[in-house]
Amino acid sequence: MTKIALQALRKEYAGQLAISDLNLEIGDGEFFTLLGPSGCGKTTLLRMIAGFNSIEGGTISFDGEVINDRPASERNIGMVFQNYALFPQMTAAKNVGFGLQTRRIARSEAERRVEQALASVHMAHLHDRLPGQMSGGQQQRVALARALVIKPALLLMDEPLSNLDAKLRVEMRDTIRQAQRDAGITTVYVTHDQEEAMAVSDRIAVMNLGVVQQVGTPAEIYRRPANRFVAEFIGKTNLLECDLIRHEGKLRIELGKGQVIDVTDIVDASGSGRVQVSVRPEAVKAASTGLAAEVVDETFLGSHSQVRARLQTGDIVEFLEFSRRPALWTRGDTVFLDVDTDLLTFFDHASGVSIMRGDAV
């Protein structure tokens, strides 16, 4: 296992800053995910850790040793790419064993480790299958086995599931997570898929424009986003604007006509002013009384319906309805909404930074 430390890391392309003074620590055996939109710098950062990209500033350390100048071939990493990168003329077993050949592992030991690696990703039965005779999911399993068989100190994965269909992505993310746990290898995983990141990660670093916005467990990032970008990028949210009012030592907001909320104990603000509030869909439910809203549309999704409604303020709120009926409302219907205030997050209107108290749940 390997502990990784990135300190004041900096990367430029033709004078353009791609990574800006980035600091991160990744623990031994941790499954750590770099998450963000296209162009945020996550793959660039992964390639810097791998030794494929140059470093314009800062240091990368493995177990306390700076490895900036160490070539990729000497960093003892396993790599899983988006496009599988299998040799088309080699069987699954030979693809997996290729790295062992270059390391001059004895034949009997290599065969044992290849079979063990294939079994760990449920591919032992396709030992002699060529890549062209496999599905995308099967090829990616072989690519994962190839990365694991060399017993690397560090496993790096760059968007490994993006070429698979939705069902296969779910299957493969479970396989990847279990294989990583069994091997105990420190893993850095890159994805733009929030659900995928939440499902596999011990911790997540959310990135945007080469800057880490927040680091935390999936639950921490989802429930307590550090800023507006994280709140909007992780999962779905309704982002509403309202006035924070200070009256007789108390802080209150009017979420909409009909619901005034006391936020004294959860918001850290010295005065009044405009704020934004993140309202997750699960924080809203239909009720007999509450915020009056007009149904905009309802989309039936099988296990639940996704409903959008317009508040009297003009804001659109999305919520989930788990009734078994395909449709409960039609466009223009009036619905009353109850909001669970314990699930709200508040942000400064100007900066977008969270103004939640540190001890707020």
Image (spheres, rainbow, N blue to C red):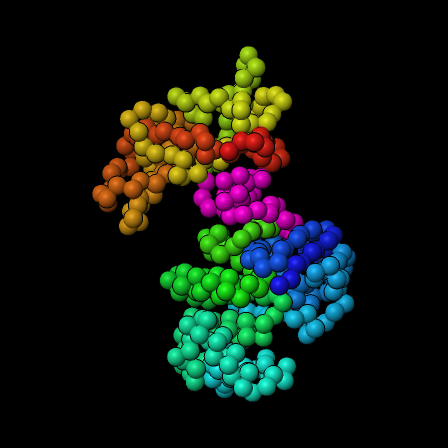
Q: How many marks?
A: 0
User: Quick check: 357 above or below 204?
Assistant: above
Residue shown at the point (58%, 39%) measured from the top left:
227
Foreground residue among 122 and 157? 122
Does residue 95 appear anywhere in the picture? no
Q: Position of residue 119 (x, y in %)?
A: 44, 74
Residue shown at the point (50%, 40%) measured from the top left:
223
Q: Tell me: 154 left or right of 124.
A: right
Q: Tell me: 244 left or right of 310.
A: right
Does residue 319 appear anywhere in the picture? yes
Residue shown at the point (44%, 38%) measured from the top left:
280
User: Quick check: 196 above or below 140?
Assistant: above
Q: Tell me: 71 left or right of 242.
A: right
Magenta range is: 209-237
User: Quick check: 129 above or below 264?
Assistant: below
Question: In the image, is residue 93 part of the stretch drawn in magenta?
Answer: no
